[in-house]
Image (tube, grey):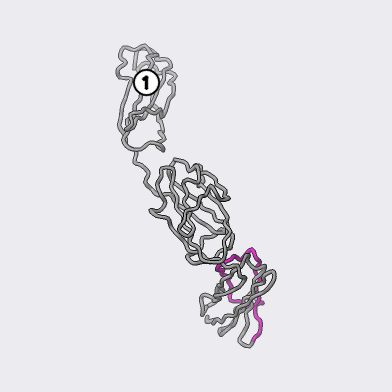
Amino acid sequence: PGESDSGPFPVLIQATGEDNIPRPVAQFTVANVAPDAWFDSTIAINTDFLEGAHSLTVRVDRDNVVQEQFEDNNTYIASFFVKPDTSRPQLDVTFDGYTPLDGDYIRYNPEIVVELRSNSPYPIPSTDHFTVTLDGLELDLDSIDHDFTPSTKDSPARLRFQPILEDGIYYFGFNGMDGKDIMVYEEVREIRVRVSTESRIAELYNYPNPTEGETAFTFLLTGTEPPQEVEVKIYTVAGRLIRKLSYPASAMRIGYNALKWDGRDEDGDEIANGVYFYKIIANFPDTSFEEIGRMVMMR
């Protein structure tokens, strides 16, 4: 309030933390305040990079642009506290697009993608925030062929690499830290995977068995690449073929697979209760393999 229009004057809002360094959080100019009038403004303060105890200082007409009788009331100071973000970042690891279970088979040259997500506003700018180990030894990511994409506000940091592995058992370990150096895990998390370049099909079974209708045929595929085609043939105990299913290579992967069947024959009719046999045939470029299983339909 005053006896004449104020005219334009600046407003500066600063936040000062425990380091006693004022940081501007807002700055604007008020066009005018009429006599006996008020100016109200709501300012949103971004606290992403503020932590702990702070003081908020509002300075009006800091340079004494407006002629006024009293100027010692042009500064307002308040205290506030920003609770630091202590939540751990998240790490997602996939081998050829899926997350293997411990002991799973993988391809000999899997595409491994590691994504690191964080709620922290601090970016993840380099592979220095990733830890990858193989059989207990940390990999020097700068010395291997890899792709890296730093994090943004809306997307995680992404590391991609594709090692070439011989047949055997491997222990891959992964960890990461966000821009505030908060680790995903206290220690590196390991996963055991297996590699076999021998083309074969094994560990065939269906679940549920007995089944009341639908069931899934599960089996293990090994080799350098998935088969070109997988066929499922279902027979009665008398040997009559009642259903044939075909799946392309795009539906398969090295490792464990599951193919669903609706419990119907070639005419779309539900099959009768009883015992049935099924044959899984994996057609690789140079050879074919087959396995036979037994199931019970019990509606």
Q: Is residue 258 magenta?
A: yes
Most foreground residue, 268 or 29: 29
Total numbered labels: 1
User: Mark 1 — residue?
Assistant: 60
Residue at point 58% right, 83% down? 276
Task: Tell me the kind of residue under disc 1.
Answer: Val
Q: Is residue 9 above or below residue 51?
A: above
Judged from the image, the secondary structure of the residue bearing numbered disc 1 is: strand
Residue at point 41% right, 43% down? 180
Query: Could you tell whether 42 is left or right of 148 in the image?
Result: left
Residue 243 position within the rendered picture, expressed as x and y whole percent measured from the top left: 65, 77
In which quarter of the view is residue 24 placed? top left
Residue 55 position within the rendered picture, expressed as x and y whole percent measured from the top left: 32, 30
Q: Is residue 282 magenta?
A: no
Q: Is residue 109 above or below residue 158?
A: below
Residue 90 position within the rendered picture, expressed as x and y whole percent measured from the top left: 44, 51
Q: Is residue 206 above or below residue 113?
A: below
Residue at point 43% right, 57% down? 189
Residue occupying the far bottom of the picture: 238
Query: Could you tell whether 286 is left or right of 223 in the image?
Result: right
Residue 119 position within the rendered picture, expressed as x and y whole percent measured from the top left: 43, 45
The magenta segment is 239-266
Q: Is residue 136 above or below residue 269?
A: above
